[in-house]
Image (cartoon, rainbow, N blue to C red):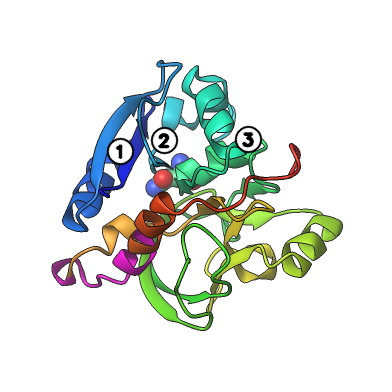
């Protein structure tokens, strides 16, 4: 079965074509979904790509979370469908409360655009299914507000629940617990600040991102159990 991936386009998104190209390269069937549509269509996975939805006004993702498509994304996620938010998409998912915590301004208050090393912490997520914990990946980051934060109780829940998906080996932005990506309880909703679609060809300096996107396509075909709780 060819996995059909809906890539949501908000006004200000700028990484959608990179995601389309990377998914196509892996044999998936990626198509754009406009944020103003209340339906996702027939898709097996959803990606909220990076960029600056609504110009990051108020806070990144704060306006995008009210887009009509987000009701459909939430229903799809509750049904166990794989949903991945990349960078700005991660910010949207936290604002929508589909993932816990928040992304605040980087430590040092500078925009970061560099390749970082990540460690896969768990294989219990839609983005790391079948990837051995401990695997190291080189993937670019490109953000001003990527400093993941949450209260101590939430951090303990994330760690105890095996919901820290990716860690930075050399924390570039001040994220609590070196966290680069987290999941919801069920593991089907994942947010990460690094851009796997920008590491999808050796010509780009790394194709390590394909490890994650390949896992997403595999998850699309074999759904994880639905989330048990509405509030992650
Ligand atoms: N590359 C991106 O998605 C940018 C993310 C975001 N709007 C920030 O700068 O924090």
Residue 167 lies, in percent from the top left, at 56, 71
Which segment is the magenta one?
Answer: 202-213
Ligand 1, seen in the image, is in the quarter at top left
Q: Secondary structure at mark 2?
A: loop
Q: Is residue 98 above or below residue 138?
A: above
Q: Quadrant of residue 96?
A: top right
Residue occupied by mark 1: 14
* Distance from mark 1 CB to nearest ligand 1 atom below 8 Å: yes
Residue occupied by mark 2: 52
Image quadrant where one finds the C terminus: top right
Please name whichever residue, 175 or 157, is drawn nearer the observer in this view of the structure. 157
Residue occupied by mark 3: 95
Residue 72 lies, in percent from the top left, at 51, 25
Q: Main secondary structure of the magenta part?
A: helix
- Verify whether residue 16 appears in magenta: no
Asked if disc 1 and disc 2 are in contact, CB closer than 8 Å, the reply is yes
Q: Is residue 162 above or below residue 31?
A: below
Instruction: Give whichever of discs 1 and 2 has the lower sequence position.
Output: 1
Q: Residues within 10 Å of mark 1 (few under 14, many from 20)?
A: some
Residue 143 is left or right of residue 186, and the answer is left
Residue under the point 41% across and 50% down: 220
Residue under the point 66% across and 62% down: 163
- The residue mark sitting in front, 3 or 2, is 3
Instruction: Give whichever of discs 3 and 1 has the lower sequence position.
Output: 1
């Amino acid at each position: 079965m060819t996995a059909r991936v809906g890539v949501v386009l908000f006004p200000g998104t700028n990484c959608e074509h990179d995601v389309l190209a990377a998914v196509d390269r892996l044999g998936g069937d990626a198509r754009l979904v406009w944020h103003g549509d209340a339906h996702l269509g027939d898709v097996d996975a959803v990606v909220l790509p990076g960029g600056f939805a609504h110009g990051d006004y108020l806070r990144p993702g704060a306006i995008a979370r009210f887009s009509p498509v987000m009701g459909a994304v939430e229903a799809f996620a509750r049904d166990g469908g794989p949903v991945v938010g990349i960078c700005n998409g991660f910010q949207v998912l936290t604002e929508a409360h589909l993932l816990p915590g928040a992304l605040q301004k980087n430590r040092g208050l500078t925009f970061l655009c560099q390749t970082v090393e990540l460690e896969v912490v768990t294989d219990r997520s839609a983005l790391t299914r079948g990837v051995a914990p401990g695997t190291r990946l080189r993937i670019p980051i490109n953000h001003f507000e990527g400093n993941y934060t949450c209260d101590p109780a939430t951090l303990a829940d994330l760690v105890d629940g095996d919901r820290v998906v990716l860690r930075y080996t050399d924390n570039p932005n001040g994220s609590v617990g070196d966290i680069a990506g987290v999941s919801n309880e069920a593991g089907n909703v994942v947010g990460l600040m690094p851009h796997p679609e920008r590491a999808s060809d050796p010509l780009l300096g790394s194709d390590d991102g394909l490890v994650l996107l390949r896992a997403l396509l595999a998850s699309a075909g074999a759904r994880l159990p639905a989330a048990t709780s509405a509030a992650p």
